[in-house]
């Protein structure tokens, strides 16, 4: 039964990513799986139940990945110590891994594509897209950089502007990947992003000989 429920979830997400959430019906999902609607309803109450399960899994995966990379798994107010203790090395590595995650992981990639399609049709989807892909990561990075400035690791600059400057290439490279379907014709996106993060840190970190 668990395998069937998983197949329904993954098939639905692939269809949502290809055609958009609103365009896909329970019948469409059931037909793609070669089952009846009645059989599908034994696992999920309706299409919204499937969608809610997808979002819940995405939130869980996101938290698990952050913990695995020794990064904050929740917003600053919920765990300020994690932001204060985040290292430059972990921030740099986690940023590069986020690119891999959003482009190479099937679940994450399809989740992102679904939100990209639906952000123009639904306020709820637009908010989720912003929370997961745009404003959420920028706010997360801003909180990290604010703590680095407080500790005297980064130069005293506007943390929000720093966050936008740092995150923008990641967002751009993900979109470039979607257009080509590969990591880049004239260079590896992972390598480009890795070089960007290293250069960014070098540009904004306080040298040992500099005053605070």
Image (cartoon, rainbow, N blue to C red):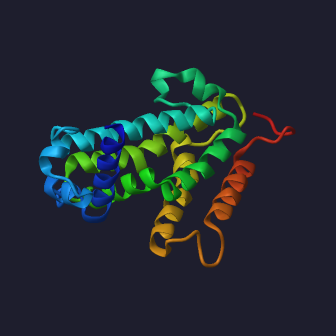
In this rendered view, identify the residue nearer to me: 10 or 1: 1
Does 180 sit left or right of 202 as displayed?
left
- The x, y position of residue 100, in whole percent, is 57, 55
Residue shown at the point (87%, 39%) measured from the top left: 209
Q: In which quadrant will I find the C terminus? A: top right
Regarding residue 155, the answer to whether it shows in the image is no
Does 125 sit left or right of 144 as displayed?
left
- The x, y position of residue 43, in whole percent, is 23, 38
In this rendered view, identify the residue nearer to me: 64 or 190: 64
Residue shown at the point (44%, 51%) measured from the top left: 108
Looking at the image, which residue sits at the far right? Answer: 209
* Total numbered badges shown on the rendered structure: 0
Q: For residue 188, what is the image quadrant?
A: bottom right
- The x, y position of residue 196, in whole percent, is 66, 58
Vertical side of 86 occupied by 8: above or below: below
Q: In which quadrant will I find the N terminus? A: top left
Q: For residue 41, what is the image quadrant?
A: top left
In this rendered view, identify the residue nearer to me: 85 or 108: 108
- The x, y position of residue 197, in whole percent, is 67, 53
Q: For residue 146, what is the image quadrant?
A: top right
In this rendered view, identify the residue nearer to me: 149 or 174: 174
Regarding residue 60, the answer to whether it shows in the image is yes
Residue shown at the point (58%, 68%) measured from the top left: 183
Vertical side of 163 occupied by 113: above or below: below
Looking at the image, which residue sits at the far bottom? Answer: 185
């Amino acid at each position: 039964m668990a395998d069937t429920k998983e197949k329904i979830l993954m098939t639905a997400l692939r269809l949502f990513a290809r055609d958009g959430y609103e365009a896909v019906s329970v019948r469409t999902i059931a037909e793609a799986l070669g089952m009846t609607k009645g059989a599908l309803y034994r696992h999920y109450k309706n299409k919204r139940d499937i969608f809610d399960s997808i979002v819940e899994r995405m939130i869980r995966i996101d938290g698990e990945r952050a913990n695995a990379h020794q990064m904050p798994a929740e917003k600053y107010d919920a765990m300020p110590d994690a932001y204060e203790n985040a290292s430059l090395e972990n921030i740099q590595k986690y940023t590069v891994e986020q690119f891999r995650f959003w482009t190479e992981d099937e679940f994450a990639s399809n989740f992102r594509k679904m939100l990209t399609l639906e952000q123009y049709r639904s306020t709820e989807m637009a908010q989720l897209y912003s929370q997961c892909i745009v404003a959420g990561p920028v706010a997360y990075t801003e909180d990290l950089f604010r703590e680095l400035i407080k500790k005297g690791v980064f130069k005293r600059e506007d943390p929000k502007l720093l966050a936008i400057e740092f995150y923008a290439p990641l967002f751009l490279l993900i979109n470039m990947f979607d257009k080509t379907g590969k990591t880049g014709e004239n260079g590896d996106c992972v390598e480009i992003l890795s070089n960007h993060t290293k250069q960014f840190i070098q540009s904004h970190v306080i040298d040992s000989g500099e005053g605070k």
